[in-house]
Amino acid sequence: MVMIHMAHQKNVDKSKADDKYVVQRIGGGSIVDRRPIFSPDGKLLYVVYGHVIRAFSTQSGEQVRDFRGLSHPAVGVQVHPTRPELVVAVSESGEMMAWRWESGIHMMTVRLRVAGLANEDVRLTGFKLLPSEDGDCDVYVTWHRAGRKAEMSIFSSKGRHKVDLNFKFDNSSHSVAFAFGQHYDGRYVVAISREKLYTIDVKRNQGKWYKVSGKRLLTCVACHPTELCVATGDNTGRVIIWKDVLDNDQPPSAIYHWHTLPVTDVVFSPSGSFFYSGGGECTLVKWRLDSPHDKSFIPRLSAPICHLNVSKDSLYVSVSTQDNAIQIVDSQRNIKKTVQYFSWGVQSAGDDTPLFPAGLNLDHRTHSLVLNSRAGHIQFYDPRTHSLLYNLDITGFNYLTQERNTKIFNVEVIRLALTRCGKWLSTVEFIDNGELSVQCTLKFYSFNETTQNYSLNTAIDMPHDGRVHALQFQPAEGPNSVLSAVTTGDDKKFRIWSFESEKNSIWYCSSVGYYRGQPVKDAAFSPDGSVLGVTFGPSLTLWNPENCNLQCSLSSANASDSLPIKFIQFGSNECCHLVVTGTSEALTVWNILTLSIVWTVPLRLSILTKDPCSNYMAAFTENNTVFIFSPSSSSPVFRFANVCPSDKQILSAIFMPRQKPRNDGSWQASSQLFFIDSNQELLSLQRAEEVYDANEIGLGLPDWTPSLTPFSSLLAQQASSAAAVHKEKNHKQLGEPGKNEIEEVSSSSIYLYDLFLRYSRYIHI
């Protein structure tokens, strides 16, 4: 056996100019972290998207304009209170920029600096523009010290530091929120921290604090537009209306209680006669201020509510939800439009189910990526246009909201696969709440060319006893090929499902396979579909999918290599005689002609995926390093460390074939590598020169990515080389070498099953 470390060789030149790669954000990124605002006429909705402010039409939901130029992520967006033609945003670093809303022309940039503190010691978290006495505006800024203290300062519109308000909170244990109001004698500011409501009269810079009863924590706050009245939400679902809060030691209050979960946001209407509240129940509640029992609802929103806002004419309400969507609701309580780029997962099917459990999948018909969406749905996302094509409801269930002191699980899609032609889609939906029996359903959908939608063909309850680990269609070479798919499950078996086209046009289980009572994990077909590889414990087993006959079982002779195999991929093109397997500690390549190990490397593997259009594969490790390699060589052609922050992890990856392949000879010439992380961002590796105006378009570099530097200065992060030549080492053969057959594979496409018949005399089962 050959044991080789997949490490960078010192004698390899890594400083090639064409190897400068950076991580680029293709999709994802939150549009719901900050509250969106309406334009004065209500025709536009301004949304914070990283470094960019985006304007959307409330009539069509389409993007109208971008406001660009911030060097750091924005903490909010406002319309200038005395010059409504200006849109203003402030970044985390204190950079304030203004643009004309009609043209997007940049008008000014002002630096807000807190006196006596260096920029690196301060991080802005929010701001508010309010009219000033000189006819311009004051900028109220909330910020955190390096020691996690939340404070507020007032600046002039020119950036001059005026005063620090008498607020200072410990922000380490509970969120802090601020709101701004107007009363008969001036302006006031309120804040919440844990169980206390703080108020300050801006003119006197003095205030009071009030404490809610019981073991309750305040979660949100809003001020009445014209009166000395404050609304707060708490973690028990109550909304408390406080009156006369500046000078009264015991201000009168009223309780409005419908929510059972924490109230996440509350907002008054422009007239102040109504207010809206939202929380984890996925329901928008409209209250009459003068009647706590008079309320109306918009139920069954797509996900729990994050933020609310109301247009000046009260015609629209924006509802930001946790699935990364903003729903625009009209005065008749109808959802008029939805703004959404990339749908986020909200809740998993069980404690051990990660985000996006179905991973990244490719739909060749639409040239889009298919992955989990909100609970029970899958989404078709086009990474070229950065657009969400559509969502498909798989489970058909309403979203079950959480209950107080009880964790509720929703049915989730944990596996999906599509045929290359896009005619068939298969999914596995699963739920395990730890109390009742496990529910699992395998479904097959056919695409209707007339309706341009998928329709359910077959549903199979409990295809396996427990969770399904793998789902894959068999590659079909021609129109008359038999449609088949394979699944593996907790019952230590794999099942082959076939389509009966002559009688009932349904899918059925045509065969079942198992091996020595070993647990089964992954399964994959060879590129031509003639061989099925299934991993049972530490063994790689190869089967004839037509009759489910076991052809051979391959295991390492090294007793230390007894870890279960988690991943399997067949090589493509001239590497079709090689199979790559991965455990949690090693990556191994097998030659299925000679039945021997070609090479193995120690690697803490987390993801393995292959490029269907070339020989290359990508291996992601637990420490967020990616290796690009060919199964024919243990020397990686590319290496990139820290593809995401150390506190995040890569969840899934896929090579997507290019519609127009490149001629540059790079490892991404035929396909592009995409991967998604636990921050729910879709990422890719791009050459630095291709990341054009990265921050300006709101995509480009993620917020955690360092600035671009020459490739030669990032030797610890990236390494690229041609396949290095290694000195031959003696190793044990698990079968006889097949030189002639290997040459045949290299020169022409071969039917792999015939080769297994030739080598069956060397196989020991």
Image (tube, rainbow, N blue to C red):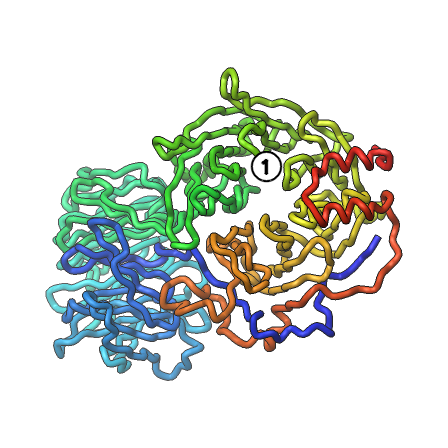
The number of numbered discs placed on residues in the rendered structure image is: 1
Q: Quadrant of the C terminus?
A: top right
Identify residue for label 1: 475
Quarter of the figure with residue 166:
bottom left
Please state which of residues 389 and 309 is positioned toward the viewer in this rendering. 389
Quarter of the figure with residue 468:
top right
Residue at disc 1, secondary structure: loop
Taking the spot 71% from the left edge, 56% from the top edge, the residue there is 603
Q: Residue furthest bottom?
A: 116
Q: Amino acid at mark 1?
A: Pro
Taking the spot 46% from the left edge, 36% from the top edge, the residue there is 410
Residue 692 higher or lower than 538, as above or below = below
Q: Position of residue 605 (x, y in %)?
A: 67, 53
Residue 101 higher or lower than 240, as above or below = below
Could you classify mark 1 by the number of other residues whose Cα lies within 10 Å: few (under 14), some (14-19), or many (20 or more)? some
Q: Position of residue 716 (x, y in %)?
A: 64, 71
Please state which of residues 389 and 52 is positioned toward the viewer in this rendering. 389
Q: Position of residue 697 (x, y in %)?
A: 36, 64
Q: Is residue 157 visible?
A: yes
Please state which of residues 249 and 675 is positioned toward the viewer in this rendering. 675
